[in-house]
Amino acid sequence: MLEALRTMVIEKMDKAQLKQLLESVREGAVGVDDALDRLRHMPFEDLGFAKVDHHRALRHGMPEVIFGQGKAPEHLLGIATKVLERANNLLATRTDPRAAELVTSRFPEAEYFPLSRVLRVWRDKTIHGKGKIAVVCAGTSDIPVAEEAQLTVEIMGNEFELIQDIGVAGIHRLMANRERLANARVAVVCAGMEGALPSAVGGLVGCPVIAVPTSVGYGASFNGLAALLGMLNSCASNVTVVNIDNGFGAGYVASLINRL
């Protein structure tokens, strides 16, 4: 057990602190579960421009995800390289095409999805979820956000059901997919305009529904604010809401729920 604990710790961890913890486990002063709990909070690797949290996977079951927007391509490559030194999988969202090109040239197995601007390296494809996650979007214009959610769900080890273009303007399309939705353990529902679809789905299913407002719509949609407010005021009690266009956040939380 001590050897297993050692293998979870990387070079940057303070050696004296680690030695003291392992000695405490050996002497019985600290239980294995307590030791694991302490290890969840260390260490990180300081690159100067970023502090890479290598123990995110231990705490959340997923390595640190890179938010690519605003990062210099060289910085994103540097962070990705360090993550992949100690993890099998990598996920970067809002990735600039030039940054994606740098990463894919260094890691040929990396995939870039220009519609959602997601970059991933997917080596470990183990299924961790207990059921399927439905990833739903109201219209074709919502697909980029839904794809971000889908790719997040997938790399976090879940089976998923992708259901596109079933918005309330043609409610019969939603009803035609009722059985597929009912089989889901969690549903991620993306919609713009007035944001009605998550409430409609929530009324049909018994699982948690994570609503994602998108910035799709004309002027008074206020770049997704109208959908956000509508979803926050949903009368379906199983609906909760993430930020505008945050398909990643919805997919991440859905994955955590699906492991329970």
Image: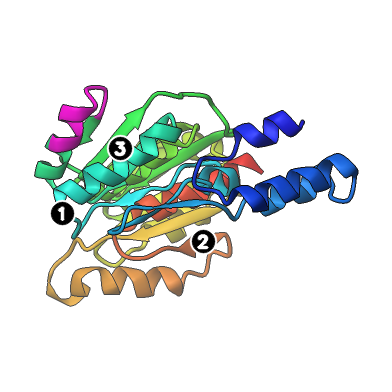
Q: Is residue 151 visible?
A: no
Residue drawn 46% across and 24% down?
Answer: 125
The answer to which image quadrant residue 81 occupies is top left
As measured in the structure, the alpha-carbon distance from the residue carrying label 2 to the one carrying label 1 is: 37 Å
Asked whether disc 2 touches disc 1, contact meaning CB atoms under 8 Å apart, the reply is no
* Residue bearing mark 2: 239
Residue 155 locus on image (x, y percent)? 42, 34
Residue drawn 37% across and 34% down?
Answer: 84
Q: Does dot 3 land on a helix, a strand or a loop? A: helix
In depth, the one of 175 and 248 nearer the eye is: 248
The mark closer to the camera, 2 or 1, is 1
Q: Does dot 2 land on a helix, a strand or a loop? A: strand
Question: Looking at numbered disc 3 in the image, what kind of residue is underneath it?
Answer: Thr
Q: How many marks?
A: 3
Q: Which residues are magenta?
A: 102-110
The local crowd at label 3, few if under 14, some if 14 to 19, many if 20 or more residues have their Cα within 10 Å, is some
Q: Is residue 247 visible?
A: yes
Residue drawn 20% across and 29% down?
Answer: 106
Question: Looking at numbered disc 1 in the image, what kind of residue is underneath it?
Answer: Ala
Question: Looking at numbered disc 2 in the image, what kind of residue is underneath it?
Answer: Val
The local crowd at label 1, few if under 14, some if 14 to 19, many if 20 or more residues have their Cα within 10 Å, is few
* Residue bearing mark 1: 72
Q: Is residue 141 left or right of residue 130?
A: left
Outermost residue, front side: 16
Residue 109 is a magenta residue = yes
